[in-house]
Amino acid sequence: NDLINKIAAGEVIERPASIVKELIENSIDAGASEIIVEIENGGISLIRVSDNGKGIKEDDIEKAFMRHATSKIKDEHDLFKITSLGFRGEALASIAAVSKVELITKTNISDFGIKAYLENGKIVLKEYCGSTDGTTITIKDIFYNVPARLKFLKSPSREQAYITEIMQNLALSHPQISFKYIANKKNVFITTGDGSLKNVIYIIWGKNVFDNLIEVNSTKETITLKGFIGNSKLEKSNRNYQSIFVNGRHVRNKTITAAVENAYKSMLSINKFPLFVLNIFINPELIDVNVHPTKAEIKFSDEQKIFKEVYSCIKESLLKKDF
Ligand code: ADP
Ligand code: MG
């Protein structure tokens, strides 16, 4: 079965950033409103993700680290339904297979927390401990038992840059969650979780890279587009300040990028890349799923229609305001 194959291939943990992404997505799925991410040495020495979500019941801990044969998705289109970010039931198992894991977790129906250590995917120690509600997962020594993979990691600063990109995209797509991101014991950014996307953009990108933000909020036949677009203040603008989310997932798609940039250029005689954060909501059936589920690249069944609709949403929003 093609779907099963895609899913199986996709669960490979490539680098520290893949672990950070999977752990945070689990925290989001657990209903957390606060997520703290600490990394050291680009995540190679340490990754710690703490949340105030619902926790894992004692009886479910072992299962959480087991590779499920059963996936939460029945149909490929389910990947883009906005229900939960996790679907393969393989992330924790994969992470525990290639690194040392410490888990501390507590549900609100329990009076105490549980601490577990895993090595080579097996629980080697489990004990009760004091804890607040939620889950903290600490990953040490990524790829300690897969030296070939360890060798392929880039420098700690490059690995940290990958993690920062993941953190930014998750913070941008979840303004209602407070993210605290600490690298080498220094705060990189802290979002408030007040629900304002504009505030998240200010916090993570700073005020030096753009000089205004125009709200986009428009619905067409097949899409609803929500977010912000702004002018780059950078001498040499680039595409580093462009994020697209489809039904809550970060994606890359040249058609959307081109539609936004073309609409922007048609309205303003600015020869720079615009900055934007855009959420597209679309019926999952209209997404061409013949693309690897864990890759950010996506295609739509009708790319031309998407181009036209995004183009006109952006134009409409820019018309409402003058720069
Ligand atoms: P998936 O997210 O695809 O279900 P994972 O391997 O990422 O698979 O996680 C396995 C299970 O462990 C989740 O379905 C969830 O029940 C539980 N879990 C993992 N992380 C957390 C967390 N931070 N809080 C609560 N439950 C969690
Ligand atoms: Mg998951």
Image: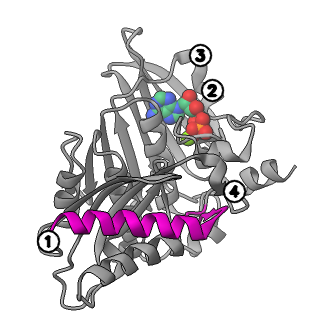
Q: Residues within 10 Å of mark 2 (few under 14, many from 20)?
A: some
Nearer to us: label 4 or label 3: 4
- Residue marked by disc 2: 62
Where is residue 163 shown, x and y percent of the image?
A: 40, 62
Q: Is residue 244 magenta?
A: no
Q: Report the residue at 47% width, 60% height from top.
A: 17
N-term mark: 4 or 3:
3
Task: Name the main secondary structure of what is drawn in magenta.
Answer: helix
Question: CA gap, disc 2 to disc 4?
Answer: 32 Å
Q: Nearer the viewer, residue 55 or 203?
A: 203
The three-letter code of the residue at mark 1 reads Asp
- Residue marked by disc 1: 322
- Labels 1 & 3 near each other (Cβ < 8 A): no
Question: CA gap, disc 4 to disc 1?
Answer: 38 Å
The three-letter code of the residue at mark 4 reads Val
- Labels 4 & 1 near each other (Cβ < 8 A): no
Q: Secondary structure at mark 3?
A: helix
- Residue marked by disc 4: 289
Q: Is residue 317 magenta?
A: yes
Q: Nearer the viewer, residue 199 or 317?
A: 317
Q: Report the residue at 11% width, 68% height from top.
A: 207
N-term mark: 1 or 3:
3
Q: Report the residue at 31% width, 83% height from top.
A: 265
Question: CA gap, disc 1 to disc 2?
Answer: 57 Å
**Location of residue 143 by image quarter:** bottom right
Question: CA gap, disc 2 to disc 3?
Answer: 7 Å
191 sits left or right of 167 in the view:
left
188 sits left or right of 211 in the view:
right
- Residue marked by disc 3: 59
